[in-house]
Each structure stands twice: as structure tokens, then as C-alpha cells.
Amino acid sequence: MTNTGPDVGFATLTGLIGVSGTKDGQDAEGHRDLRDPEVSPSDAPTTTTHLSDEQTAAHQALVDEWNEKLDGASAEEILDWVNQHVTGTVAVTMSMQDTVLAELTEGRVHDAEMVFLDTGYHFDETLDVARDVDARYSLPLRTVEPVYSVKKQDEVYGRDLYKRSPTACCRMRKVEPLARMLNPYEAWISGVKRVDSALRKDTPILDVDRTGRLKINPIAAWTDQDVEDYIESHDLIIHPLTTQGYPSIGCATCTMPVAPGEDPRSGRWANSSKTECGLHL
Ligand code: SF4
């Protein structure tokens, strides 16, 4: 398994792969240079379409009225609330590290779909869990992929972009596909927890994202022990690597095992200052 190196700048990258370009990703004639890791493939949108002002305002009103009231509620009560108050289809984001959100949402939020980002760099075990999830739950599972395969990304940006610029790699393989994926949905459910990191310690139960969509974090207040207890008591699908020293699982290329007692997320982008892929910022 290869670990990520530090995020390096454009000048270093062009030196490494032998191309020339400018910081805004254009060559001397003004053509976009896809070899610049700051420039995404142009075949698909990179951002989510904004909801209307009316929908955004309606979501903000829900947050204002309910966020504090739901803060002490159970995850099940929060999702029952979603079923009663959200009129459009809800996306349930699944990393496949665990299947808690699928279990909580199944039979509780009736207009919901599970979505899974297949970055092309997942562990085989993660893809096995995705297949098992699809078989176990009646919620539809939508798999979303980046514009470029790993092979194509290597050809265009140079091999192993994740080693040189994990931020650019995450942008093209996670953040932008998620942005496109969210277009049909009015709201999305995430498994972010306040204990995950300092950046997430103030995660609200309800939020309005930058596109006006309602973001629901039903297990924001859970501890890691709460997750373990729920998995055991509901006999959930177990990602095998979670029992082999990988408490936080992302792409195989950027995830290292963690010693007992260490920060569970310290195995993600280890030896790099990066701590978030950007999906939840
Ligand atoms: S976590 Fe995945 S998408 Fe992000 S830099 Fe690593 S390989 Fe790329």
C-alpha cells in the first residue's frame, strides 16, 4: 500500500511531469491545460445546481425552527422527522466503512436513495461491502464515478496524482462527483460525527449547504462506541478492515492502519497535512 506524500504546488508538479502551463490552467495560447491539477476534466459540471431561493429559504426556516429541538433526539427520531418534513428525494451518503446510515434510513425515510462514490481507488473489501449493502437493503443504491478512470487520470495528469496533490485528486474523484450526484436531491444525509475531528466538533443536526440543500447529520452526537454498539446490536455488515487496524477507511492509496490508542482518523492521508477530502467542508 502506498501512502500519500505532501501536497505540492503547481510549479513542482510541472517539473515532475515535464509540462508547462500557467496557474490558471491555460497554455500560452489560452487553451485549458488539463495537465494542471487545478483544472478539472471539462466533460461534466463540477458544482451542484443551486436550489431556488424559495426552496433554500424553506430549508433555512426548518433549520431555524428545528435544529435545537432535534439536538437531543435519537437518530431514529431525526430520520422520522426527515420523513415528515422533507418533500423531495433524500440522498444517503455511504462510505461503506460501516452501514449504520443504511440501517437507520431503511423503512424510515421513504423517498431516499443510497449513494456511493466509487473513486476507483477503493479497497476490494469496500466494493464487497457495497455489493452486500445493495443486496440487503431495499433502498436503491446509486454508484457515482469520477469523469476519468484512474488510468485516464494517470495519462492526463501524470501517474499517482494522489501522491503529489491529494487535494486535486480528492477534488476530481470525490468532491466534484458528489456535487454532480447531489443535483436530483433536495436533501442529503451524512454520517459525520462531532468526535471525528476538531473540524467537525460543532456539526449541527440540520444545516443548509452552499446549494440550498438540507444536510442532515443524524449521528452527529454519536461516539465511536455508539457506532460499535449499534453495529453489534443490529448485526450489521462489517467492513473486514475495520477489525484489522483500519478504524477510518477511505481510498486504499491514502489509508494506513492505525495502532491501538491512536487517533482513528490518523491513518487517513498520513504524513500529509490533509485531514478532510472536502466533502463536508
Ligand atoms: S483519498 Fe482517494 S481521491 Fe483523495 S487523494 Fe487519495 S486516492 Fe485521491
Image: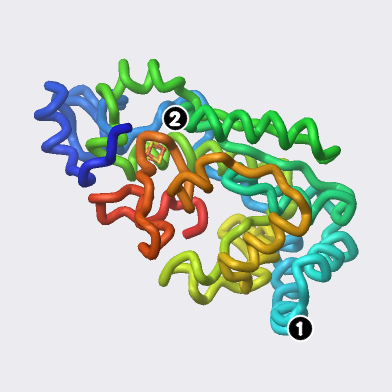
- Horizontal arrangement in the rendering, residue 270 relative to residue 178 (left or right): left
Residue 2 in sight here:
yes
Q: Residue at x 41, y 27 (%)?
A: 41
Q: Which mark sits nearer the N-terminus, 1 or 2?
A: 1
Label 2 CB, ligand 1: below 8 Å? yes
User: Relative to residue 66, is residue 144 depicted above or below?
Assistant: above
| Crowd tier of the residue under label 1, counting other residues whose Cα lies within 10 Å: few below 14, some 14–19, many 20 or above | few
Question: Residue 259 placed where, x, y %?
Answer: 35, 55
Q: Secondary structure at mark 2?
A: loop
- Horizontal arrangement in the rendering, residue 242 relative to residue 17 (left or right): right
- Asked whether disc 1 touches disc 2, contact meaning CB atoms under 8 Å apart, the reply is no
The N terminus lies in which quarter of the figure?
A: top left
Q: Quadrant of residue 64?
A: bottom right
**Disc number placed over residue 190 in the picture, else none:** none
Give the residue type that dot 2 points to. Tyr
Q: Nearer the viewer, mark 1 or mark 2?
A: 2
Depth check: 70 or 195 in front?
195
Depth check: 246 or 183 in front?
246
User: Relative to residue 223, is residue 48 depicted above or below?
Assistant: above
Q: Quadrant of residue 217?
A: bottom right
Q: Quadrant of residue 129?
A: top right
User: Relative to residue 9, is residue 68 depicted above or below?
Assistant: below
Q: Residue at x 59, y 30 (%)?
A: 127
Alpha carbon separation for disc pair 1 and 2: 40 Å
Residue 33 in sight here:
no
- Ligand 1 location (quadrant): top left
- Horizontal arrangement in the rendering, residue 192 relative to residue 232 (left or right): left
Depth check: 276 or 228 in front?
228
The tally of labels here is 2
Residue that carries the numbered disc 1 in the rendered image: 69
Residue that carries the numbered disc 2 in the rendered image: 121
